[in-house]
Image (tube, helix red, strand yellow):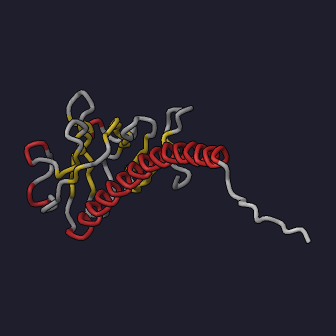
Amino acid sequence: MNKTLPTNAGFSLVELTIVIAIVGILSGLSIVTFSQQLKKERLKADTREAMSWIKATQGKAIQQNKICEITINKQLNTASQTQEAESNIAAVDRCADISTYTLDSTIHSLTPDPYSSSSCLIGTDSNALRITFTARGTLPCGGEIRLISEDSKTTRCINLIAPLGVIREGLLNQGTGSCDYTSAH
């Protein structure tokens, strides 16, 4: 009777090296993709937080039955209650205690609503946009805020529509240069 010797079946060094190389390449590609997606998600989260803060200010105007006026400052990257010296609203009619919100993303541009008065922009160089919410939640001054990601590849938009007081978010269409508000993106 012939006795068969057990074979030591296993992987050769060349096979293991090839598998490790393939896993390394796939890992490298996924890390780059994950990093890009993380930046986009951070921008989306910051945009939604800013929208939430603006909507809370609009709600405060309705709740207090007063006029809430905020200034979005491009240089400081903040949104805060308009200073009394810069406001045309009497102190009695103004909302009280509006907190300052600092954006994590960079404000790329501020554009007043074309149907609003020119008093929406503060200064001549478009560094500050004044947004006013009436006691009914409407907007005499609206506009568009564009936030840009760290790598400057993605731009998200917040649109405040005067006079209705509708606040919506969108994504900049690189081809047309305008913001797309048709879906949540």
In the rendered image, which quarter contains the N terminus? Answer: bottom right
Q: Is residue 175 above or below residue 23?
A: above
Percent of width and height locating residue 47: 37, 51
Percent of width and height locating residue 23: 58, 48
Percent of width and height locating residue 154: 45, 40
Residue 95 or residue 117, whichever sits in front:
95
Q: Is residue 85 above or below residue 63?
A: above
Residue 178 or residue 30, whichever sits in front:
30
Dividing the picture into quadrants, the one containing residue 61 is: bottom left
Q: Residue furthest top?
A: 125
Q: Would residue 134 appear left or right of 171 to someone viewing this image?
A: left
Q: Is residue 136 above or below residue 22?
A: below
Residue sitting at x 48%, y 40%:
172
Percent of width and height locating residue 37: 48, 48
Residue 9 or residue 95, whichever sits in front:
9
Residue 34 or residue 135, whichever sits in front:
34
Residue sitting at x 28%, y 63%:
56
User: Number of callouts in the render?
Assistant: 0
Q: Residue furthest right?
A: 1
Q: Is residue 173 above or below residue 30?
A: above
